[in-house]
Amino acid sequence: MSKTVIDLVAGARPNFMKLAPVERAFQTSGSLATRIVHTGQHYDTQLSDVFFTELGIPRPDICLEVGSGTHGAQTARILERYEAHLLENRTAAVVVFGDVNSTVACALAAVKLGIPVIHVEAGLRSFDRTMPEEINRLLTDALSDLLLVSEPSGVANLLREGIPESRIHLVGNVMIDTLKAELDRSRDSDVLSRNGLESGEYALVTLHRPSNVDDPAILGPLLHAIAHISHRLPVLFPVHPRTRASIQKSGLDQFFSCSPTLHVVDPLPYRDNLAAMASASMVITDSGGIQEETSILRVPCLTMRANTERPVTVEMGTSRLLGSDPLAMKEAAETVLDGKWKTGTDIPLWDGQAAERVAACVLKWISDRNPGNPR
Ligand code: UD1
């Protein structure tokens, strides 16, 4: 009998490190065949291809090549192209990851065709509906049949929203599986020497959220604060294309050359970024994933957001929320340099084994649905 086939969907950078261990866990179990779908939401080599190569993800079976666009246009293109694909190529279930536009678009395409949806990283809520990702999370979870959750807040959120407990499973954080698998290999990275940096003596900065980078009145003061910090401590700043475009559009380009100890570089491949995080004295970021990774690496995380959908990183990890406040950023950097930042504790189920739990849950769920035809 031929194996049951399921689709694994990825579209943007943060999806790839979540898909990698899950794909591997299914391969190891040998019970299911997987088909990798790349929507093409991210298409630059630095935001996409390098992750497939570095993380050993097989080439996608299907590329939808949707590219960039407004939220409506991009989501609609993914929906239309993925639906067309599903109509020709049925699948037993669709696994979607995280909260990007590709996640919600593919979930919607599948569910309208009666194909069950499995959401990895379900239940996270920032309670801030101005974030595009929050809308994607709410909708994806409402459409999903099986909700696999990374931290306890996610379970509480889903129960409060009326999702039956039987469909919710706390499995841990699959992105941390990738971090743990790659940490040793990342020590071979030359990212520090390439940028003239010493371990433990620099800050790593990443900013890409629309709420921080789209409005020059918010972005300008944040860049000033980063430049200010670079006079205290060298700064490595891999710039997301969205942020670079916004800096250029708002005439803030002088930032790129304002300080000899500010190293502005292109987005980093996975292992370089991991090495740069692991050896930093602090990370200044608005990324959700980096809040999680720095918590596991026990590196102080200055989170330039007013809220987080990942409260465990604040409660147990190393993240503190600073809003989009440049003064708070500068003061927090001083707190780290004074050695007064919290060190964090272990986070339950962020142990490098989450993908195995995802695979086990999915296999059991499929066999429970088809008792006469297990797998
Ligand atoms: C997306 C996700 C965000 C995630 C982030 C990680 C949504 C709503 N947002 O945001 O949750 O944290 O990815 O990077 O899904 N661009 C390129 N090359 C690319 C892709 C994009 O230059 O390969 C530029 C384009 O100008 C594009 C802009 O970046 O318009 C934004 O890309 P988009 O995919 O819309 O959102 P991100 O800001 O990357």
Image (tube, grey):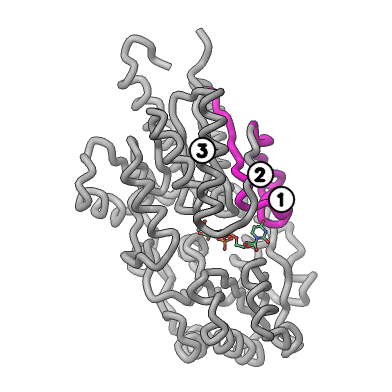
Residue 364, horizontal then vertical, whole percent: 35, 25
Q: CA gap, disc 2 to disc 3?
A: 23 Å
The reply to whether residue 316 is in sight is no
Q: Residue at image x 48%, y 19%?
A: 4
Q: Nearer the viewer, mark 2 or mark 1?
A: 2
Q: Amino acid at mark 1?
A: Val
Q: Which span of residues is magenta-colored?
A: 33-61
Question: Quick one: SS at disc 1?
Answer: helix
Q: Residue at x 60, y 85 (%)?
A: 223
| Quarter location, residue 119 | top left
The mark closer to the camera, 2 or 3, is: 2
Question: Which of disc 1 and disc 2 is earlier in sequence?
Answer: 1
Q: Residues within 10 Å of mark 1 (few under 14, many from 20)?
A: some
The quadrant where residue 124 appears = bottom left
Mark 2: amino acid: Glu
Q: Which residue is mark 1?
A: 50
